[in-house]
Amino acid sequence: MPDAYRNLLEPPALVRHFLAHPPSGFAALSLASGTPAFVAHFDLLTTADDALRRRVTGLPLYDLWGRLLRPRTCFVGTTVSEYALFPAAADADTLVAEWLAGPARAHPFLIVKDIPQQSPLLDQASNAQARAVADACERAGFVLLEGQALAWVPLDFESTDDYLARLSASRRKDIRRKLRARAGLQIDEIPTGDAFFADAAVRDEFYALYLQVFAQSEIHFDRLTREFFDAVLQDGALDGIVFVYRDAGRVIGWNLCFVVGDALVDKYIGFDYPAARERNLYFVSWMHNLDYALRRDLCCYVAGWTDPEIKAYLGARFTFTRHAVRPRSRLLRAALRRLGGHFESDRAWADAKDAQRRPPDEPA
């Protein structure tokens, strides 16, 4: 790994753990420039909107030829970082030339994932490099697609009560009602590397709760491995904090966050269903994270990609990325340019969002 990446919101060691223990079925790569990457079979309908997915899966004999839509794909980036990571000293055109000469020739699909777009979480130099990389990709024939909505909260309030006061009266009432569940919970804050995580049975339990969350997710892409969590939970140098939620002494949820610079970065959760749902842990953990960040005098809370509707309901702001996609087939490139809007669901949601909509259901 190079000494410095741009766009890295996480501890560098988290990327090293990803490269050493990639998700199940993935192969991790480190390119000549030091740029992290990985290879995996990728279902091209993963981020397609419902209309396109129904049209494609409804075509004759889809069960026979549908596997062709899961090509071996090289991704420039990682699944443990919010953004694609580029060596700080790298030139954009040189990086793209490296990707074209290597991964693009070896794989039918190449995707540079999560290129920042004028991110408020990054400095000017990082945003400038990201823009240069996106421009260089476009010149090289990549198709640029809007990526996911990254939720974040600037900590420009004095307390969580002040934070809630900014929301509508109906939302405040609903969230405060859900937060009553905190009264019966024990919440522990345990740093990564603590002796608590030396017990393999504890790590077994935590991994099982992670798998429960993974199983109920709408998108099944990167299933992180037990080995990855073993390494992360026992690494005290990460400056990670695990919030552990217990009900009557039993662990019903956990949330792993990292303090990096002036930010609290929320990365992984594990929930025991249905107890976590009954105790409104999604809402409880959100507010607990904000309170923790305030106690540490941090500047922002970075809440991740998934469930933008509920995060908007909870008061988050959003910043978007782009993916640079290059099918080896020119025919597929042309088709992607025509159909690209069907793969930009988060942007479509953001554009259509109605601030006065009824409260969404809590994520399962």
Image (tube, grey):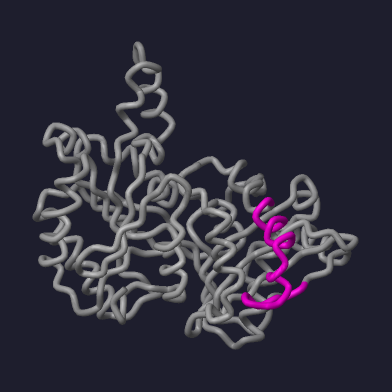
Q: Nearer the viewer, residue 58 or 19?
A: 19
Decide whether residue 205 is among the magenta residues.
yes
Place of residue 338 in the rendered image (x, y in percent of width and height, measured from the top left): 20, 35
Name which residue lies at 18% across and 34% down.
332
Decide whether residue 84 is among the magenta residues.
no
Kindly give the residue lying farthest to the top in the view shown.
60
Q: Nearer the viewer, residue 20 or 361?
A: 20
Q: Does residue 256 sit above or below 339 in this rendering? A: below
Name which residue lies at 58% across and 71% down.
257
Picture quadrant of residue 163: bottom right
Side (left or right) of 86 relative to 227 = left
Name which residue lies at 44% across and 56% down.
22
Name which residue lies at 39% across and 41% down.
47
Q: Main secondary structure of the magenta part?
A: helix
Place of residue 33 in the rendered image (x, y in percent of width and height, measured from the top left): 20, 69
Picture quadrant of residue 202: bottom right
Q: Nearer the viewer, residue 347 or 245?
A: 245
Q: Does residue 174 sit above or below 302 in this rendering? A: above
Picture quadrant of residue 18: bottom left
Place of residue 146 in the rendered image (x, y in percent of width and height, measured from the top left): 31, 51
Place of residue 222 in the rendered image (x, y in percent of width and height, measured from the top left): 47, 49
Please identify the quadrant where the N terminus is shown. Answer: bottom left
Q: The magenta stretch spans which residues?
A: 188-208
Please identify the quadrant where the C terminus is shown. Answer: top right
Side (left or right) of 206 relative to 29 = right
